[in-house]
Image (cartoon, grey):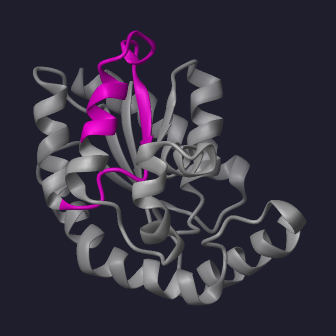
């Protein structure tokens, strides 16, 4: 299974990716988690991207594409993976195509959530996290992230609609229902497109 989970910030990509990975026994490759871990560890990469991330900006395509290429080439990802937060640009999508080589994606699934719900989710997540709040969990940063999403990532949906098994899932449903729908899509796509 080689899956891309797409959707705006706060749409539930991370939650769903973790659930799918647990069910299928494949790694969850979240560029956001990888970059946040690098920042927390104070690595050279983390130091280079910390200010950009805190301001709600996007890390350069080359940096993120190199991280993903290394991860999908690793032994742990040979049975498959779920990409969460990548690709965010057409350049990243083209880079992913090169990294996949002869392998194709099983599916690209976009979680659809209205923007007003995204603000509610981010505010709830910030309130519930109490001392472990992500630096980008606030309304001002979400607005910047949504602008970047609209400017760059929406075009990635169009890129995949004509090239890969592409599906939209209602991200407003309860998480268990979203997970069940994604698993149904993956089962069907694996049978049809493999």
Numbered-mark total = 0
Identified at 39% across, 24% down, the residue is: 1
Q: Position of residue 4 (x, y in %)?
A: 37, 43
Front one among 127 and 58: 58
Please tell me whether residue 186 is drawn above or below residue 25 in the rendered image. below
Left or right: 175 in relation to 167: right
Front one among 59 and 165: 59
Please tell me whether residue 109 is drawn above or below residue 82 in the rendered image. below
Left or right: 86 in relation to 162: right
Is residue 8 visible in the rendered image? The answer is no
Left or right: 35 in relation to 108: right
Magenta span contains residue 88: yes
Q: Position of residue 111 (x, y in %)?
A: 48, 61
Q: Position of residue 83 (x, y in %)?
A: 41, 41
Q: Quadrant of residue 125?
A: bottom right
Magenta span contains residue 105: no
Q: Quadrant of residue 75?
A: top left
Front one among 83 and 64: 64
Region of the chain picked out in magenta, as a range: 66-89
Identified at 45% across, 84% down, the residue is: 144
Q: Position of residue 84 (x, y in %)?
A: 45, 47
Q: Looking at the image, which residue sits at the far top?
A: 75
Left or right: 98 in relation to 190: left
Image quadrant occupied by the C terminus = top left
Is residue 139 visible in the rendered image? The answer is yes
Identified at 42% across, 53% down, the residue is: 85
Please tell me whether residue 90 is drawn above or below residue 74 in the rendered image. below
């Amino acid at each position: 299974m080689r899956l891309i989970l797409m959707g705006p910030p706060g749409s539930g990509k991370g939650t769903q990716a973790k659930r799918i990975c647990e069910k299928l026994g494949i790694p969850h490759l979240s560029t956001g988690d990888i970059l946040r871990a690098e920042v927390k560890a104070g690595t050279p990469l983390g130091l280079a991207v910390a200010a950009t991330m805190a301001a709600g900006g996007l890390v350069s395509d080359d940096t993120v594409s190199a991280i993903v290429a290394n991860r999908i080439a690793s032994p742990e990802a040979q049975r498959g993976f779920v990409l969460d937060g990548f690709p965010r640009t057409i350049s990243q999508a083209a880079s992913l195509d090169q990294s996949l080589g002869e392998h194709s994606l099983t599916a690209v699934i976009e979680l659809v959530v209205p923007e007003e719900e995204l603000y509610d989710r981010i505010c709830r997540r910030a309130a519930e996290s109490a001392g472990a709040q992500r630096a980008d969990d606030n309304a001002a940063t979400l607005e910047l992230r949504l602008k970047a999403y609209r400017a760059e990532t929406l075009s990635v949906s169009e890129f995949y609609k004509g090239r890969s098994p592409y599906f939209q899932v209602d991200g407003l449903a309860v998480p268990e229902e979203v997970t069940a729908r994604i698993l149904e899509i993956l089962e069907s796509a694996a049978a049809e497109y493999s």
